[in-house]
Amino acid sequence: MKNTNTNGKIFRKVLAFVLAVAITVTFVQPLSAQAKAKVNKVKLAKQGFTIDTEVIKNVAKPLKKGKNNLTIYHQAGRNYEGYVKFVAPASKTYTFEFSNLKGKKSVGLILGAVMGDYIKGQTFITAKIGPKQNMYSVHIGSRTVSTYKKSYKSKIKLNKGDTIYLYNQFITHNKVNNAKSLTLDVKIK
């Protein structure tokens, strides 16, 4: 009569399965962690519109290539404003995608624009950043209303070292219970 050790066979099969799962998790986990895109979180300085070039240069927060999540703070009334800048690491046409404008639910509809300028000395040169030719701003909304879209893509040609300053200005529909801040995603390719 042959002695079959059923418990030993079951134990070896369970152990083999556990080892296979452990090896799979060990190899897959680092790969999935590397695949996640890093988001550059940018908190804008509390600064409304100004024509003082030195103020703009000092308060504008830097954007990076890739995904940027902007936090735009409440100024006064229903206004949310602030400056960011992007310095071109190489000469090429960059694609800027503006999307995902959000605030607390209580603020209701959010509408606004992103406008671009170059600063040469003390002079502003307005940048055509709109999605259409001769359009100087991008109209963004928390939902699509007339010319305000939930997302826009703009192509901007920059030379290496060029700095574009983007002024973000938004207004909320409901001035009661204004949120401390709004968020906007800006992806640069």
Image (cartoon, helix red, strand yellow):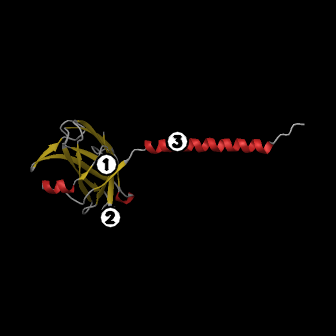
Left or right: residue 8 compared with residue 169: right
Mark 3 residue element: helix
Q: What is the distance, in whole Å, between disc 2 and disc 1 at their CAs?
A: 19 Å
Residue named by callout 2:
176
- Nearest the eye: 111 or 180: 180
Left or right: residue 140 compared with residue 165: right
Mark 2 residue element: loop
Q: Position of residue 77 (x, y in %)?
A: 25, 63
Q: For residue 163, which numbered disc appears in the image?
A: none
User: Could you tell which of marks 2 and 1 lies nearer the N-terminus?
Assistant: 1
Q: What is the distance, in whole Å, between disc 1 and disc 3 at their CAs?
A: 39 Å
- What amino acid does circle 3 point to? Val
- What amino acid does circle 2 point to? Val
Can residue 185 be seen here? The reply is yes
Badge 1: residue crowd in 10 Å (few <14, some 14–19, many ≥20): many
Depth-wise, is mark 2 or mark 1 nearer the camera?
1
- Nearest the eye: 40 or 134: 40
- What amino acid does circle 1 point to? Gly
User: If the image is split into quadrants, where does the C terminus sit?
Assistant: top left
User: Could you tell which of marks 2 and 3 lies nearer the N-terminus?
Assistant: 3
